[in-house]
Image (cartoon, rainbow, N blue to C red):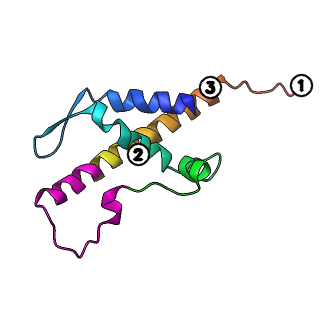
């Protein structure tokens, strides 16, 4: 688990300390680490078949945008922009998580020796 977190943070920080969204706004990647934590805690792990949040707390965390009713009128014009940005951040973090899982798997597979069948 620690190796996965380390790989995830390395891949996340590889984008640089400043992240620019599609509208040209810049965001400090350090302020997005809680979103990275949420992506990790709500991702299903292959070894357990459950999310770390489910194993630790018994329920999955949700972002405020998960609870928004799509039929309601936007209260603030920037709320839809924020939702799109958070969705992109979540996709980026999930991709980083998947990349780190794959990297850890490849590293583990390379370190294993094939048994002699003599």
Q: Which residue is mark 2?
A: 94
Find the magenta span and give its range.
63-86
The disc at residue 118 is 1
Residue at position x 55%, y 29% in the image: 2
Q: Residues within 10 Å of mark 3 (few under 14, many from 20)?
A: few
Q: Which residue is mark 3?
A: 110
Residue at position x 49%, y 32% in the image: 5
Q: Residues within 10 Å of mark 2 (few under 14, many from 20)?
A: some
Q: Position of residue 69 (x, y in %)?
A: 29, 71
Distance in Å between CA atoms under marks 2 and 1: 44 Å
Residue at position x 83%, y 24% in the image: 116
Mark 2 or mark 1: name the one nearer the start of the chain: 2
Distance in Å between CA atoms under marks 2 and 3: 24 Å
Q: Position of residue 7 (x, y in %)?
A: 46, 29
Q: Quadrant of the C terminus?
A: top right
Mark 1 or mark 3: name the one nearer the start of the chain: 3
- Lateral position of residue 68 relative to residue 72, left or right: right
Image quadrant where residue 9 sits: top left
Mark 2 or mark 3: name the one nearer the start of the chain: 2
Disc 3 on helix, strand or loop? helix
Q: Position of residue 100 (x, y in %)?
A: 48, 34
Image quadrant where residue 109 sits: top right
């Amino acid at each position: 688990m620690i190796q996965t977190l380390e790989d995830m943070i390395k891949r996340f920080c590889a984008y640089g300390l400043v992240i620019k969204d599609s509208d040209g706004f810049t965001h400090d990647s350090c302020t997005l680490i809680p979103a990275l934590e949420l992506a990790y805690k709500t991702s299903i792990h292959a070894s357990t078949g459950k999310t770390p949040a489910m194993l630790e707390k018994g329920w999955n965390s949700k972002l405020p945008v998960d609870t928004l009713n799509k039929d309601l009128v936007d209260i603030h014009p920037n709320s839809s922009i924020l939702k799109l940005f958070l969705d992109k951040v979540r996709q980026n973090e999930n991709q980083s998580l998947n990349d780190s899982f794959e990297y850890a798997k490849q590293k583990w597979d390379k370190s294993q020796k094939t048994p002699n069948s003599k």
